[in-house]
Amino acid sequence: MKPNQSDALGTDAIGSLLVKQALPASIGILVMSLNVVVDTIFVGNWIGSIAIAAINVVLPVSFFIAALGMAIGIGGSSIISRALGSSNRARALKTFGNQITLTLLLTVAMVIFGLIFINDLIPAFGGKGDIFEPAKIYYRIVLYGVPLLALSMMGNNVIRAEGKPKFAMIAMIIPSIGNLLLDYILIYIFDMGMAGAAWATTISYSLSFFYILYYFLSDKAELKINWSHFGLDLSILKEISALGFVTLARQAVVSVTYLLMNNILFNFGGEASVAAYGIIGRMLMFALFPVLGVTQGFLPIAGYNYGANKYKRVRESINKAILYAGGLGILIFILIMSFPAAITSVFTNDPDILSETPHYMRWVFAATPIIAIQLIGSAYFQAIGKAVPALLLTLTRQGFFFIPLIIILPYYLGELGVWISFPVADILSTIVTGYFLNREIRKTLKE
């Protein structure tokens, strides 16, 4: 690899560059999402539907801690992309070193906190009744590996900021394949139940971490840091925190959403409704992989060219990212609307879940064709280092619209109100994001 490979972000044709960046990101997200889906299929068929609900309860806790790494990775990578675009390698190196230090300090502290309050957190996130014990088994084991997952998520974004999406893709594929193999061995062959599912996940985190460590220690990496770069720099920390807080806030709101959804659905339909949400939630992770891949591929392109003052290329990257992601969103919409019952039947043979989940799944995906505008719009502000609008636009869907909706609508529509909240929140947040993105383009992106 050439040490100046990131320069291609500012010279290659935007269309081909977006494909080169988005395709590996999409494949990586696909494999990770497929891993979650197949993991849920294994758990549902080999352990039972209660196990699906138990994992769904644990996800917001472990995801939030892992999101610390993702937040630091995306926030720091925005700085790195712009620093490389303006040929400021010293700032890029110092930022990377600070990312590592910050990720370790925060995630280890969060794991300790999570273990101390284990008996309070699980019920708070909906782990009640028959769900509590299997959720506790899964939670404790998975939490051990979360710091390694956080470091992996952080390092993955830095690799992408260097302009090497294929290595970032491999870093996402390795743990996914490892987890599926370990699921088969530990759950099916050794009959370890929830503990087997948890250890498979934790060990897979380790595989991802060691691959990324290998990458940065090899001559393939562009950023070669030394011990001096690990010392915390207040100005860099402030910028990482401001930009990373966008991602962290989004994940925090997702965790709050899981908490509310699990509790509201448990009150309406018990364990079966929570399990149905577990299935639909996995499909949200899985089905949207190409749209999310385009968003991930868009970030370094927009950040690099903005740092290099190539505003025409930034505008072009926005337009093409929305076009590509929107087209993919339409295809996803058609598939989900056509086969919701077949999709649900893959996860479980429980008649209660099979009867209701397809109908609810259609509601959840009803606004998929338009979500590209919201995702690309909020990602753009993050890529160019404008933390406040990035934060506000990121929170529009989950925080400003979705959470109030799932609290209000069920009073009038019952459980159906919970599911209708998904497309309504998507439509409202897309309108708001589209307005502010268009205003920013007209105001700032002038040659």
Image (spheres, helix red, strand yellow):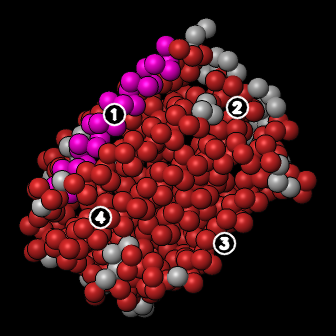
Neighbour tally class for label 4: few under 14, some 14-19, many 20 plus, Cα within 10 Å:
many
Quadrant of the image occupied by residue 324: top left
Q: Position of residue 116 (x, y in %)?
A: 57, 84
Mark 1 or mark 2, earlier in chain? 2
- At label 2, the amino acid type is Arg
Q: Are marks 2 and 3 in contact (CB under 8 Å)?
A: no
Of helix, strand and loop, which mostly describes the magenta segment? helix
Left or right: 197 in relation to 164: left
Alpha carbons under labels 3 and 1: distance apart: 36 Å
Helix, strand or loop at mark 4: helix
From this view, report whether residue 436 is shown above or below residue 219: above
Helix, strand or loop at mark 1: helix
Neighbour tally class for label 1: few under 14, some 14-19, many 20 plus, Cα within 10 Å:
many
Of circles 4 and 2, the one toward us is 4
> In percent of the image, x 43 and y 62: which residue is there?
255
Mark 3 or mark 1, earlier in chain? 3
* Residue to which mark 2 is pinned: 82
* Residue to which mark 1 is pinned: 430
* Residue to which mark 4 is pinned: 261
Quadrant of the image occupied by residue 110: bottom right
From this view, report whether residue 245 is shown above or below residue 135: above
Neighbour tally class for label 2: few under 14, some 14-19, many 20 plus, Cα within 10 Å:
many
Q: Which mark is residue 417?
A: none
- The stretch in magenta equals 417-442
Mark 2 or mark 3, earlier in chain? 2
